[in-house]
Image (spheres, helix red, strand yellow):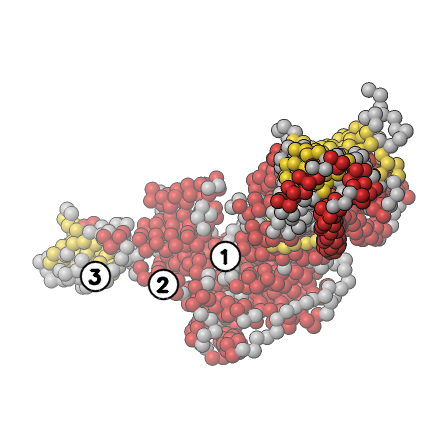
C-alpha cells in the first residue's frame, strides 16, 4: 500500500473516533456519530485506501449499525424511564425531578420510538421528586427521567431506509440510462449515430473536430462519459493513425473525445453520476426538478463550452493537414430486436422530455427500458450482470449519507457554525462551485458531489440564512462544476483513457482541459447568477 | 579305335624277330617325357602298353593337353614324312612300353620290307583316320565355341554399355544434387544483399523527399554535410554495443523516440558529443529541427552505404560463381587451387554458417588441371564434411606445396570414419546417410567422383582419421612444372 | 503496463537494420530489440526483455552462425515465459524440413521469404501482435493506433461498458 493510503486509513479512523471523544456544543449524539462516519468517508474517498465504492458500502453498513432503530446501538441503548405516581389531587403526578426540563416539559417515550413532549405545571419540588400537574400524563406514561440522555432528541431511522438508498428513484433513473446505453452499444446504435453526425462534415479537419465534440457530447448525455469515450476512441484512433506523427491534429482529435464526453455528461441527469447525486439531494429536500428542466438548465452551458472547446483545441493544436478522410463503419441495425431498441429508446426519451406535460416522474419512466429491454429479449442476463453495480453502490452510499446528515441534525449544526448570511447567497453558491471544480480535478466526480451536496443542502435548510441562495441552483452548479474538473489525467476516466492512447502528453491535456474547465466555470458562475435561479423554488 | 593286345603282341614279336627293323622295346615310367616340343625326333614309336599324353605349349609358354596316344598308336607319326622338329611334348601318363625304331629305317621298311606294310599299314591308316576325325571334331568344337564366345562377348558388351550409362546417370544425378545445393546457397547468399539493397533503396526515396520538403539554409549545409559524411563512413555496430549505447542515450535523452535513439547510437560517441554540444544541448526550436535533419542526413548516409555494401556482396558472389562454374573448360590449364577453394567456400557459405571455418592456404598451389572438375572435388569434400559434422563443428581447409606435389586437406570434427570403412567410402553408392531422407541430397557418389577426378589428374585422394577430431581428406596433385616450392 | 517487445534476430547487419527500419512504426508501442545470433538473442530475452516486460513477436532468420533460427524458436516455445510470443521466420533459404519443424514445434506463426515486401512484413507482424494483445491484455486502447483496429474494437465493444466514477 502506498503511504497516501496509509494516511487515508489513519485519518479516516481518527476522524471516525473523534466525535466519540470530543463534545461539540449544540450537536446531538447521533450528530456526532454521523460526523464520524462523514469524516471517515471523506478521508477514504479522498485518499482511497480502498476502492471508493467500498467506502460507500462501509458507510451504509456503519449507518445501519450505529444510526438505525434496529441497529445494536439504538436497539439496546434507551433513556431511563419511570412511570408517574398519582399524587393526592387528580391530574397531579409525582415525577423524578430530573425529568422536568427547564422549559416546563417532560419527554414521554413512545412505544413506537421517539418521544413526545408534554407540558407540565410544576407545583413543588420535594427532594428527588417533583409534583406536577399535567393533563396529558397517565400512570402508564413512560416518562424519560433524564432528558439530557444522549439518545434523546433523535428518532432513529428504520434500517430499511439506509439500505433503500440503492433503490433510490434517482439510481433507478440512472439504471435505466445504463441499460439503454448497453443495448445501444450492443446493437451498434452509437456507431450508426456517430456516422450520422460525422458524415455530412466532409473531410475538413476543423469541422471534423467540431463534429467529434458534438457527437461525443450527444452520446455522452445518455451514456456514461467513460463508455462514450471508449466507443469514440475506437472510431478516432485508427483514423489518426493515418496522420503524420507530428501533426497537432492528432492531439486535437484525441482530446475532442474526453472533452466532449465530459461536457456532454452535463446535459442530462443520467449523463453522469454527479448529476444524479445532486438531483437526489435536491429531491430529498423538495427542490428537485424534472428531467427536462435539468436539460433546459444545463444545455446552454454545454453548448457554450463545446464551442469554446472547439476554439481552444484548434487554437492550441492547429491542424496541418487539409483533409482527413473519415472511414466510418456501421449502418443502422435493422433486425427486429434493434428496431425494438429504437422504439424503447425513442419512447423513453420522449417521455423524459415531456415530463411537464404528462407529469409522470422521469424516475418512473426510467424503469420502462429496465423492464422492456429484457422483456423483449433485447438485452439479456449478460447485460444485466455487466451493469456498473459499483457505481450504483457508490451513489447509494452518497444518498444514504445525505439522509443521515439530514435526520441526525448534523445539517443544522453545520449551518449554525458559519454566519452564512454575512457571505451572501451568491457568494456561497460560487464558493461551492469553485470548491467542486477544484476537488473534482483530483477526486472522483461522484465523490466530490457526494461530499458537497450535504453542505449545500445544509445551507439551503437554514431557510433564509442567506439572501439570494437557491438550493437548486447551488446543487446544479456543484454538479456542473464538477464535470469541468478535467485538467489532469487522473481527473476523470475519459482523461485517463485518452492518455492511454499514447497520442497525448500530459501537458496537452493540462493546457486544453485547464482552459476549457476555467471557461466552463465562468459560464457556470454566470448562469448561477442570471439563469438557473429562474428554475429554483 | 583300339587294337587288340593280342595282335599288337604279334606285331611286336614279328618286328622284334626282324633284325633289319632295328626296333627296340623300351619301357617307360609314368611322368617320363618321351618327346620334347621343338626337339628333333628321329625315332618313331608304337605304343604297346600304357598311355601317353600330348601337350602343346601356347605363346605364353603354358602347356595345354591336346590328345593322348594309346597302345596301337604311333608316337611321332606326324613327323614321319617331314622330319620337322616336334611340335608337341609327349609325357607318359602311366607306365608302359613302346616299340621304337629309327625314322629312316621305318620309312625304308615300309616301302621295301614285304609284309611290314601289311602289318603296319592298317595301324598307320587307322591312326591317321582317327586323328583326322579328331581334327574335324575339333574344328566343329572350335566353330561352336567361337559362336558362343561371340554371343557372350556381345552380351558382355551390352552389359558394359548399360553399366556405363547407369554410372553416368548417377554421376549426373549427383552433380544435379550438388547443383541444387549450390542454387539454394546462391539464393540465400544473394537474397540477403538483395533484401538489404531493396529495403535501403525503398527507404532512401522517402528520406530524401522528407529532407528536401523543407528549405535548407546555407549555414546549415556544413552541419548536414557532416551528418551525411558520418553516415557514409559508418560501420555497422555489434548489436550488443548498439543496445548498450541506446540504453545510455535513453537516459540522456528520455524524450527521444526509440528509432531516433537507435540512429544516434550508430553515431560515434566522439562525433555525437560534438554534435550534442552544438545542437542537442541547446534545444531551441531551430536547433531541434537542425538536429533532426542531421540525424536524417546521417541515416541517408548509412542507407547509401548499405547499398554499396550489398552491391559489393552481390558482385563478389557473381565473381565466385564465374570462377566456380568453369565446368566447360575441358583443356588442362595451370591453376592455383586456392582460387577454386575460395570460390567454393563462398558459394556454399550458407551451409558452412553453422560451423567454424578455418582456412589456412599460405602458399600458391599451382597445378595443371581442369578447374571445373577440381571445384567438383572441393564441393564434394565440403559437403561430405558438413554432413559428417551435423549441427556444429570446425572445418579446416589447409594446403601446402612440396617439391613436386601440392596437397589440400579438408578436415572436419565429425565422428570420423570407422576403420573398416576407410576404403569403402570411396566406392560408388556407399553412403552413411539415411537413404529415405530427401533433405540430404546426394547419392553417395560424391567421394567416388572426387577420387576419380583426382586420379584423372594424376593425383591421389586419401582419408585418415585424425585422433580426437574427425576425418581428414587429403588431395595430392603433381605440381605444375616450373613451380618452385617455398624454401623451408 | 509492461512493454511488449519485438525481437529481431539476423546476422547480416544491413538486413537487420532493414528489418528494424521496416518495423519502426510499431515502436511507438512495442520497443524493438535486435540480436545477431541465437545465443545473443537468448541473452537479450532473459536479461533485457523479460525483466522489463514481455516478448510479443520474434522475427528470426533461419541460417544464423552457430545455432539456427528454428531451433532457437523451438527453445522459446518450450519456455513458458516466451511460449506465448508469436514466432515469424524470415529467411533467404530454408529447407522444407526446417520449416516443417518450425511449424510443428515452435508454433511458427508465419514464414516470410527474403527479400520481403515491407507492407507484408508489417501486416504479418501487426496481425501477430494483435493476436498477442487480444490474448494477453485487458486495456486495448493503447494499441488502437498501431494494431488491427477492427479486431481490437470488436473486443472492446464486447467488454462491459466502463462507468464513470
Local packing at callout 1 (Cα closer than 10 Å; few below 14, some 14-19, many 20+) is many
Residue A380 shows in the view: yes
Instruction: Name the residue beneath numbered marker 2.
Output: A164
Q: Kindly indicate the quadrant of the structure image that contains residue A461.
A: bottom left
Q: Residue furthest top?
A: B488
Q: Residue at x 72, y 37 (%)?
A: B18
User: Which residue is at the front of the view, B262 or B433?
Assistant: B433
Query: Residue under mark 3: which chain is it in?
Result: A
Disc 1 with disc 3 on a shared chain: no
> Of B450 and C93, which appears nearest the observer?
B450
Rendered image: mark on residue C165: 1
CA–CA distance in space, label 1 to label 2:
21 Å
| Chain where mark 1 sits | C
Check disc 3 and report the residue beneath it.
Answer: A111
- Looking at the picture, does residue B8 appear above or below residue A120? above
Which of the two discs, 3 and 2, sits closer to the camera? Answer: 2
Q: CA distance from mark 1 to mark 3?
A: 43 Å
Asked whether, in this view, residue A377 is left or right of residue A249, the answer is: left
How far apart in space, not on screen, are marks 3 and 2 (Cα)?
A: 24 Å
Q: In the image, are marks 3 and 2 on the same chain?
A: yes
Q: Secondary structure at mark 1?
A: loop
Amino acid at each position: 500500500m502506498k503511504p497516501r493510503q496509509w494516511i487515508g486509513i489513519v485519518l479516516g479512523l481518527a476522524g471516525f473516533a473523534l466525535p466519540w471523544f470530543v463534545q461539540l456544543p449544540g450537536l446531538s449524539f447521533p450528530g456526532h456519530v454521523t460526523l464520524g462516519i462523514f469524516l471517515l468517508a471523506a478521508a477514504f474517498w479522498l485518499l482511497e485506501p480502498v476502492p471508493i465504492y467500498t467506502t460507500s458500502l462501509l458507510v451504509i453498513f456503519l449507518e445501519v449499525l450505529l444510526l438505525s432503530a434496529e441497529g445494536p446501538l439504538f436497539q439496546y441503548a434507551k433513556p431511563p424511564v419511570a412511570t408517574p405516581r398519582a399524587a393526592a389531587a387528580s391530574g397531579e403526578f409525582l415525577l423524578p425531578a430530573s425529568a422536568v426540563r427547564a422549559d416546563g416539559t417532560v419527554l414521554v417515550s413512545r412505544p413506537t420510538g421517539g418521544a413526545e413532549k408534554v407540558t407540565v405545571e410544576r407545583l413543588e419540588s420535594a427532594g428527588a421528586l417533583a409534583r406536577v400537574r399535567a393533563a396529558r400524563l397517565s400512570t402508564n406514561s413512560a416518562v424519560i427521567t433524564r432528558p439530557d440522555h444522549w439518545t434523546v432528541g433523535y428518532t432513529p431511522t428504520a434500517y430499511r431506509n439506509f439500505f433503500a438508498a440503492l433503490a433510490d428513484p434517482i439510481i433507478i433513473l440512472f439504471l435505466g440510462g445504463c441499460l439503454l446505453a448497453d443495448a445501444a452499444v450492443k446493437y451498434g446504435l452509437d456507431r450508426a449515430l456517430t456516422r450520422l453526425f460525422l458524415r455530412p462534415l466532409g473531410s475538413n479537419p476543423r469541422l471534423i473536430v467540431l463534429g467529434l465534440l458534438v457527437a461525443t457530447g450527444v452520446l455522452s448525455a445518455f451514456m456514461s462519459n467513460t463508455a462514450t469515450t471508449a466507443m469514440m476512441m475506437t472510431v478516432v484512433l485508427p483514423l489518426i493513425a493515418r496522420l503524420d506523427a507530428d501533426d497537432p491534429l492528432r492531439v486535437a482529435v484525441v482530446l475532442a473525445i474526453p472533452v466532449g464526453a465530459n461536457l456532454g455528461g452535463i446535459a442530462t441527469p443520467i449523463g453522469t453520476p454527479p448529476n444524479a447525486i445532486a438531483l437526489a439531494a435536491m429531491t430529498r429536500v423538495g427542490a428537485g426538478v424534472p428531467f427536462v428542466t435539468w436539460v433546459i438548465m444545463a444545455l446552454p452551458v454545454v453548448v457554450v463550452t463545446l464551442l469554446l472547446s472547439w476554439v481552444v483545441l484548434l487554437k492550441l493544436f492547429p491542424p496541418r493537414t487539409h483533409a482527413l478522410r473519415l472511414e466510418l463503419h456501421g449502418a443502422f441495425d435493422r433486425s427486429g430486436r434493434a428496431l425494438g431498441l429504437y422504439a424503447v429508446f425513442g419512447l423513453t426519451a420522449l417521455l423524459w422530455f415531456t415530463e411537464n406535460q404528462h407529469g409522470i416522474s422521469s424516475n418512473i419512466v426510467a424503469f420502462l427500458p429496465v423492464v422492456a429491454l429484457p422483456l423483449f429479449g433485447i438485452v439479456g442476463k449478460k447485460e444485466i450482470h455487466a451493469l456498473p453495480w459499483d457505481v450504483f453502490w457508490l451513489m447509494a452510499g452518497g444518498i444514504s449519507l445525505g439522509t443521515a446528515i439530514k435526520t441526525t441534525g448534523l445539517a443544522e449544526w453545520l449551518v449554525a457554525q458559519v454566519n452564512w448570511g454575512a457571505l451572501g447567497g451568491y457568494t456561497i453558491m460560487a464558493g461551492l462551485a469553485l470548491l467542486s471544480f477544484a476537488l473534482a480535478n483530483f477526486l472522483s466526480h461522484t465523490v466530490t458531489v457526494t461530499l458537497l451536496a450535504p453542505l449545500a443542502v445544509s445551507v439551503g435548510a437554514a431557510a433564509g440564512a442567506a439572501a439570494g441562495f437557491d438550493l437548486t441552483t447551488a446543487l446544479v452548479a456543484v454538479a456542473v462544476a464538477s464535470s469541468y474538473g478535467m485538467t489532469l489525467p487522473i481527473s476523470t476516466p475519459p482523461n485517463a483513457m485518452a492518455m492511454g492512447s499514447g497520442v497525448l502528453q500530459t501537458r496537452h491535456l493540462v493546457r486544453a482541459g485547464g482552459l476549457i474547465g476555467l471557461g466552463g466555470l465562468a459560464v457556470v458562475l454566470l448562469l448561477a447568477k442570471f439563469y438557473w435561479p429562474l428554475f429554483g423554488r | 579305335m583300339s587294337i587288340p593286345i593280342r595282335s599288337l603282341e604279334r606285331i611286336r614279336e614279328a618286328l622284334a624277330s626282324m633284325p633289319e627293323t632295328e626296333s627296340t622295346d623300351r619301357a617307360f615310367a609314368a611322368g617320363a617325357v618321351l618327346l620334347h616340343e621343338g626337339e628333333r625326333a628321329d625315332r618313331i614309336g608304337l605304343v604297346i602298353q600304357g598311355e601317353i599324353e600330348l601337350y602343346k605349349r601356347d605363346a605364353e609358354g603354358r602347356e595345354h593337353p591336346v590328345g593322348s596316344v594309346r597302345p596301337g598308336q604311333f608316337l611321332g607319326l606326324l613327323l614321319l614324312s617331314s622330319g620337322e622338329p616336334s611340335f608337341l611334348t609327349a609325357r607318359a601318363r602311366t607306365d608302359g612300353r613302346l616299340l621304337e625304331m629309327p625314322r629312316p629305317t621305318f620309312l625304308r621298311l615300309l616301302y621295301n620290307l614285304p609284309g611290314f606294310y601289311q602289318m603296319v599299314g592298317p595301324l598307320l591308316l587307322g591312326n591317321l583316320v582317327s586323328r583326322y576325325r579328331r581334327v574335324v571334331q575339333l574344328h566343329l568344337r572350335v566353330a561352336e565355341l567361337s559362336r558362343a564366345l561371340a554371343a557372350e562377348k556381345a552380351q558382355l558388351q551390352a552389359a558394359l554399355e548399360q553399366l556405363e550409362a547407369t554410372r553416368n546417370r548417377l554421376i549426373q544425378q549427383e552433380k544435379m544434387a550438388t547443383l541444387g545445393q549450390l542454387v539454394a546457397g546462391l539464393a540465400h547468399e544473394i537474397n540477403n544483399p538483395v533484401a538489404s539493397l531493396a529495403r535501403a533503396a525503398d527507404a532512401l526515396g522517402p528520406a530524401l523527399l522528407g529532407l528536401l520538403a523543407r528549405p535548407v539554409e546555407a549555414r546549415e549545409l556544413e552541419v548536414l554535410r557532416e551528418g551525411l559524411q558520418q553516415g557514409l563512413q559508418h560501420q555497422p555496430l555489434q548489436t550488443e554495443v548498439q543496445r548498450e549505447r541506446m540504453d545510455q542515450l535513453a537516459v540522456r535523452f528520455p524524450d527521444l523516440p526509440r528509432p531516433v535513439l537507435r540512429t544516434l547510437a550508430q553515431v560515434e560517441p566522439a562525433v555525437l558529443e560534438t554534435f550534442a554540444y552544438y545542437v542537442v544541448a541547446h534545444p531551441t526550436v531551430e536547433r531541434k529541427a537542425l538536429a533532426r535533419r542531421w540525424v536524417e542526413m546521417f541515416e541517408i548516409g548509412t542507407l547509401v552505404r548499405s547499398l554499396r555494401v550489398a552491391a559489393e556482396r552481390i558482385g563478389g558472389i557473381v565473381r565466385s560463381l564465374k570462377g566456380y562454374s568453369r565446368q566447360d573448360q575441358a583443356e588442362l590449364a595451370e591453376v592455383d587451387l586456392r582460387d577454386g577453394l575460395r570460390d567454393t567456400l563462398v558459394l556454399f557459405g550458407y551451409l558452412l554458417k553453422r560451423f567454424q571455418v578455418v582456412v589456412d592456404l599460405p602458399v600458391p598451389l599451382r597445378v595443371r588441371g581442369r578447374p571445373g572438375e577440381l571445384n567438383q572435388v572441393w564441393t564434394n569434400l565440403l559437403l561430405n564434411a558438413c554432413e559428417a559434422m551435423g549441427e556444429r563443428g570446425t572445418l579446416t581447409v589447409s594446403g601446402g606445396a612440396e617439391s613436386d606435389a601440392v596437397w589440400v586437406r579438408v578436415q572436419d570434427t565429425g565422428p570420423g570414419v570407422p576403420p573398416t570403412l576407410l576404403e569403402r567410402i570411396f566406392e560408388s553408392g556407399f553412403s552413411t546417410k539415411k537413404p529415405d531422407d530427401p533433405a540430404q541430397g546426394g547419392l553417395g557418389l560424391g567421394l567416388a567422383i572426387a577420387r576419380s577426378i583426382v586420379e584423372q589428374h594424376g593425383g591421389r585422394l586419401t582419408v585418415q582419421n585424425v585422433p580426437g577430431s574427425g576425418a581428414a581428406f587429403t588431395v595430392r596433385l603433381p605440381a605444375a612444372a616450373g613451380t618452385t616450392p617455398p624454401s623451408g | 503496463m509492461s512493454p511488449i517487445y519485438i525481437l529481431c534476430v539476423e546476422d547480416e547487419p544491413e538486413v537487420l537494420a532493414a528489418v528494424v527500419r521496416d518495423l519502426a512504426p510499431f515502436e511507438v508501442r512495442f520497443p524493438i530489440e535486435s540480436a545477431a545470433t541465437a545465443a545473443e538473442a537468448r541473452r537479450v530475452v532473459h536479461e533485457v526483455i523479460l525483466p522489463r516486460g514481455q516478448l510479443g513477436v520474434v522475427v528470426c532468420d533461419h541460417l544464423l552462425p552457430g545455432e539456427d533460427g528454428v531451433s532457437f524458436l523451438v527453445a522459446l516455445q518450450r519456455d513458458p515465459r516466451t511460449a506465448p510470443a508469436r514466432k515469424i521466420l524470415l529467411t533467404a533459404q530454408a529447407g522444407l524440413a526446417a520449416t516443417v519443424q518450425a511449424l510443428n514445434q515452435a508454433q511458427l506463426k508465419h514464414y516470410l521469404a527474403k527479400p520481403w515486401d515491407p507492407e507484408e512484413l508489417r501486416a504479418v507482424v501487426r496481425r501477430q501482435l494483435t493476436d498477442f494483445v487480444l490474448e494477453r491484455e485487458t486495456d486495448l486502447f493503447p494499441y488502437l493506433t498501431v494494431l488491427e483496429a477492427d479486431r481490437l474494437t470488436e473486443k472492446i465493444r464486447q467488454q462491459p461498458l466502463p462507468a464513470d466514477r
